[in-house]
Image (cartoon, rainbow, N blue to C red):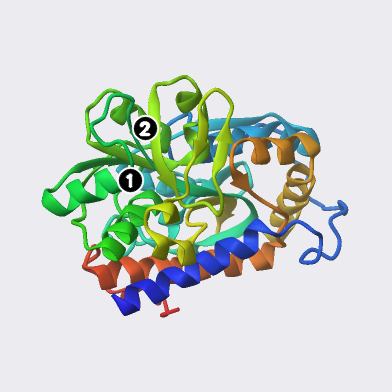
Amino acid sequence: MKNFLSLVVCIALIVSILGGCGSGEQVQDTSPTTSEWIPDRPIQFIVPYAAGGAIDRVTRALQPHLQEYLGVPVTVVNMPGGSTVIAYEHVFNSEKDGYTILSLSPEVGTMAVMGNAELTPKNWVGIGFTAAFANTFVVNKDSQYNDLNDLIDAMKKEKLTAACAANGGAWSQGVMLMAEITGANDPEFVPQGGGFVAAQAAMKNEVDFATCGLGEVVDLLAGGELRSLGYYGLEPFHIEGYGDVPVISEFVPEAAKFSPFGGWTGFAVPEGTPDNIVEKLVEAYKYAAQQDDYKAFLQENAFSGGVLSADNFQDYVNNMASVSAWMLYNKGFAEISPEEFGISKP
């Protein structure tokens, strides 16, 4: 328990720092510079989840600005499946020419220890951080669980089913954290390929509850299709037409030290991509991430974001991979030691 919780504290600290970034302190010069690489054909932006989820929505919010800066069409392509491995392997095996880029997800640090693929952060060159999302637990509007205490009590008595984006992903880690704190049983996770799709499974009563990003379900909550039992935020989040989504720490006070907790995304290209291509994509990222409508999108959807330099983002990915991989291994969720892939302890 002690080791597990100390690992999660590291995650919370990292995400908290990111939530306050964007002041320009970490990026000395965000103005575009000249690069030798000028794209001359469409670029594919691969999302490893189904449409409608947090990472998909963030990618689509960035897309027009990347397209504007690069001067060529940028097409968002959803490629869910295999606990994100299908998309990762597709991009990694593509030509390293800048025309196929990937929306990273927390699975970049866990797919190896989960036995899904041998890819680790070392196989990717980070371009830039785009957003972080707080984890929420949602149920059907007519669910017997009226609040988080009801759900926790049920988890202590039986093994529930929980829809999630991917086995071992950030959303399922949020559930495992709550179970660890409260002494409840881990549920049977039912991967859906995306957080929004997972929420739909709860809406259809196919599972007992779903775990996803709060930003993925704002519209479903506002439309009365779902209820949120709480989220790993710092304060209640108000949704017009729904009301306030409570923070998990209201029911589980110890969760306060781990909040905000959840997922994150950025984008990357495979290792071996030429430096001049990376430089151009970094320029495009800096431009897109600082547009006012993109910042407004993050705020409206309970996302946090800010500009990180490519080096700082690479460090962030490595740190998150270390924390997540060792969390899953120490919890017994992953059978392969992170040491086998050169993933050091936090």
The answer to which of marks 2 and 1 sits earlier in the sequence is 1
The three-letter amino acid code for the residue at tag 2 is: Ala
Using the rendered view, name the quadrant where residue 145 is placed: top left
Q: Quadrant of residue 148?
A: top left
Residue 32, compared with residue 319, is above or below; it is: above
Amino acid type at mark 1: Leu
Determine whether 343 is above or below 185 in the image. Answer: below
Please, what secondary structure does the residue beneath circle 1 have? helix
Instruction: State the separation of the CA atoms marked 2 and 1.
Output: 16 Å
| Nearer to the camera, 322 or 206 | 206
Viewer-proximal residue among 53 and 343: 53
The image shows residue 308 at horizontal and vertical percentages of 70, 60
Pointer 2: residues within 10 angstroms few (<14), some, or many (20+)? many
Above or below, comparing residue 181 to residue 150 in the picture = below
The quadrant of the picture occupied by the N terminus is: bottom left
Q: Is residue 305 visible?
A: yes
Q: Secondary structure at mark 2?
A: helix
Q: Which residue appears at 71% of the width and 59% of the height?
A: 21
Say whether residue 330 is left or right of residue 11: left
Q: Position of residue 233 (x, y in %)?
A: 52, 51
Which residue is found at the position 45% from the left and 78% from the top?
A: 346
Residue 148 shows which numbered tag?
1
> Badge 1, how many Cα within 10 Å: few under 14, some, many 20+?
many
> Residue 266: x, y in percent?
59, 51
In the image, taking residue 334 as reference, residue 292 lies left or right, namely right
Q: Residue furthest left?
A: 158
Tag shown at residue 263: none
Residue in the foreground of this view, choosing between 29 and 229: 229
Residue at coordinates 36% horizontally, 48% vertically from top-left? 85
Tag 2 residue: 199
